Image (tube, rainbow, N blue to C red):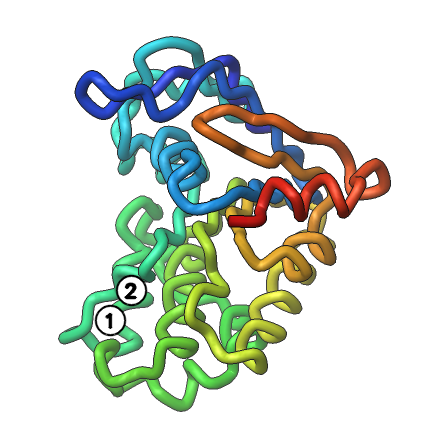
Amino acid sequence: MLTVDKIDVFYGAAQALRGVSLTAAPGQVTCVLGRNGVGKSTLLKAICGHQPVRNGHIQWAEKTLDGLKPFERARVGLGYVPQGREIFPLLSVKENLETGFAPLKHADRNIPAVIFELFPVLKTMLRRRGGDLSGGQQQQLAIARALVMRPKLLVLDEPTEGIQPSVIKDIGRAIDYLRRQGDMAIVLVEQYFEFARDLADTYAVMDRGQIVLSGTRAEMVEADVRRRLAV
C-alpha cells in the first residue's frame, strides 16, 4: 500500500501542500480531484520524487521513500505518467516504449503483449516518431511507457486532458483492466468528474493544498464534490 502521511511541500517560501495524507491499495483506483492550482500535481510529484517533502513521510510497500531519487522509486515499482505526457518527440514509438526499460533487469527488458492489447493503435505505429502522433495517441504512449516498467504503483496526472472522447474511453477501459488484475495500486489525478467518479474506489478532493473531502465511492456525495470543483 502507498501511505502519504501528513506531508508539507514548499516552492521557495510558498507552501503548496499542507499536511496531506493519502492511501492507495493494490486493486484499487484512488482519484484525486480539485480545481487548477490546488496542489494535485505537486502531490504526485512528491510521491514520485520530483518535488522534495519538507515534513511528513511517504511509504510504499513497507519501504520509506523519503530521500529516494525518482529513478530509485521507479526501481521499487513506481510508474509515473506526467501531465503533458512528456514523450520524446524525435524518438519512434518503439524507442519511447523502450525508455521504460531503464529500471528493469536485462531479462525483463521487453514490451509486454498486454500493452498492445490495451492500446492496439501503438502496434501499428511503432516506427512513427512520437511527435507525429495525435494528442490522444501520445497519451496512450505515455501510459504504455510507464507500463513497460511493470509498476506496482501507477500514478497518472490528468490523462484525459485535451483528449478526444473515444480515446478517453480507451484509457478508462485500460485503467479498469489494470485495477481488476488486483496487483497494482493506481493514483489518478483528474478534473473530469464523470471519468474519475466511474473509476474511483476511493477519492480525495483537494483545495488550497489540503484534502478537504475524502472517502469511498459509495460514500461520495456528488453535489459536495462538484461544488469543490466549480470555478
Label 2: element kind: helix
Q: How crowded is mark 1: few (under 14 residues within 10 Å), some or many (20 or more)?
A: some
Type of amino acid at the residue the image marks with label 1: Glu
Query: Residue placed at 42% from the left, 70% from the top?
Result: 162
In this image, 152 relative to 9: left or right? right
The percent position of residue 130, horizontal first and vertical second, equals 25, 77
Observer-nearest residue: 167 or 180? 167
The residues tagged by marks 1 and 2 sit, at their Cα atoms, a distance apart of 5 Å
Observer-nearest residue: 203 or 14? 14
Q: Quadrant of residue 109?
A: bottom left
The percent position of residue 3, horizontal first and vertical second, equals 56, 22
In this image, 121 relative to 45: left or right? right
The percent position of residue 189, horizontal first and vertical second, equals 51, 47
Q: Is residue 114 visible in the rendered structure shown here?
A: yes
Query: Residue placed at 79% from the left, 40% from the top?
Result: 220
The percent position of residue 42, horizontal first and vertical second, equals 36, 35
The correct choice, above or below, for 116 with respect to 224 in the image is: below
Q: How crowded is mark 2: few (under 14 residues within 10 Å), some or many (20 or more)?
A: some
Residue on which the image places disc 1: 95
Do the residues bearing badges 1 and 2 touch, measured as CB atoms within 8 Å?
Answer: yes
Query: Residue placed at 42% from the left, 76% from the top?
Result: 136
Observer-nearest residue: 30 or 147? 30
Residue on which the image places disc 2: 98
Q: Is residue 185 visible in the rendered structure shown here?
A: no
Observer-nearest residue: 148 or 18? 18
In this image, 97 relative to 146: left or right? left
Seen as rendered, the residue at the extreme left is 90
